[in-house]
Image (cartoon, helix red, strand yellow):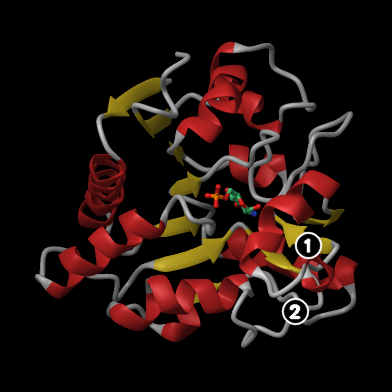
């Protein structure tokens, strides 16, 4: 595992964008696993700049997002599909059909999850998976549990996640209680993993995840077993490392 500590959020974003850009340059038809949350917003802005400057092209790239709220209209301003359109897809030369987000609007959880897992396999698997970190160590929406879920699955969000994500909704009652997420197995099969975290609020979980014991109670700790992980954190998130 390589850990890079940058001074600022802007540097973290540029560093992480460079790693993704390199992957796209080396393999123009690569398959990228993408993440939402506030952490990657800066790195997506950097990738948009690179694309608009003609340094990288997404025209043959396929993307699969980690997760989506169950039951939320993809047009809802807090859906992860909407987030991706706003922060990346609408500003780069990616082909719409090549972008995938779990279908939160399919009420049949088993079908939605199986289809998603299958489409990742059909694309040849993930070349690079980008991850943010939940405060409780969740990756995607894989919450602390007594086992590591293998495949894309439907999860009940924990109270702390609902609370944390309620800042983005008009009221806490509007936050969906369930989500579809890639499993830990899906994530671990990616050839390369890139984790980003910033801010003092993430310092404790960054330490637990990467220096603590490997346990499904801290889902991100499983990444210690992956052969190719790069963690990019700003000074505040990295202060306990
Ligand atoms: C959400 C997402 C995660 C993300 C996490 C952290 O719960 N499902 O994929 O990593 O939030 O978000 P933030 O980057 O805003 O701290």
Residue at 80% over, 41% down? 149
Residue at 62% over, 74% down? 78
Residue at 41% over, 30% down? 231
Find the distance from the CA under tag 2 to the CA under tag 1: 9 Å
Using the image as rendered, state which of residue 39 and residue 70 is in the foreground.
39
x then y, percent, for residue 99 = 49, 74
Residue 141 in view = yes
Disc 2 is placed on an element classified as loop
Residue 210 numbered mark, or none: none
Indicate yes or no: mark 2 CB to ligand 1 under 8 Å. no
Q: Is residue 80 left or right of residue 88?
A: right
- Seen in the picture, residue 42 relative to 204 is either above or below; the reply is below
Using the image as rendered, state which of residue 211 and residue 149 is in the foreground.
211
Query: Which residue is under mark 2?
Result: 72
Residue at 47% over, 14% down? 240
Q: Is residue 185 left or right of residue 195?
A: right
Disc 1 is placed on an element classified as strand
Total marks in image: 2
Residue 179 numbered mark, or none: 1
Q: Quadrant of residue 173?
A: bottom right
């Amino acid at each position: 595992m390589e850990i890079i500590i940058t001074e600022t959020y802007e540097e973290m974003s540029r560093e992480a964008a460079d790693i993704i850009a390199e992957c796209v340059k080396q393999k123009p038809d690569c398959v990228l696993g993408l993440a939402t949350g506030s952490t990657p917003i800066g790195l997506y802005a950097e990738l948009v700049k690179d694309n608009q400057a003609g340094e990288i092209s997404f025209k043959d790239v396929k993307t699969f997002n980690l997760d989506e709220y169950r039951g939320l209209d993809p047009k809802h301003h807090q859906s992860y599909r909407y987030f991706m359109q706003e922060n990346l897809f609408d500003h780069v030369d990616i082909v719409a059909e090549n972008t995938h987000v779990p279908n939160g609007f399919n009420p049949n959880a088993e079908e939605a999850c199986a289809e998603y897992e299958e489409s990742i396999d059909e694309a040849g698997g993930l070349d690079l998976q980008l991850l943010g970190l939940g405060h409780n160590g969740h990756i995607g929406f894989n919450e602390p549990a007594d086992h590591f879920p293998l495949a894309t699955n439907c999860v009940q969000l924990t109270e702390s996640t609902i609370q944390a994500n309620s800042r983005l909704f008009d009221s806490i009652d509007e936050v969906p209680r369930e989500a579809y997420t890639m499993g830990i197995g899906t994530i671990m099969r990616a050839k390369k993993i890139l984790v980003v975290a910033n801010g003092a609020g993430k310092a404790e979980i960054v330490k637990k995840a990467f220096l603590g014991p490997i346990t499904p109670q801290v889902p991100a700790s499983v990444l210690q077993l992956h052969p190719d992980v790069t963690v990019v954190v700003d000074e505040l998130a990295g202060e306990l490392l």
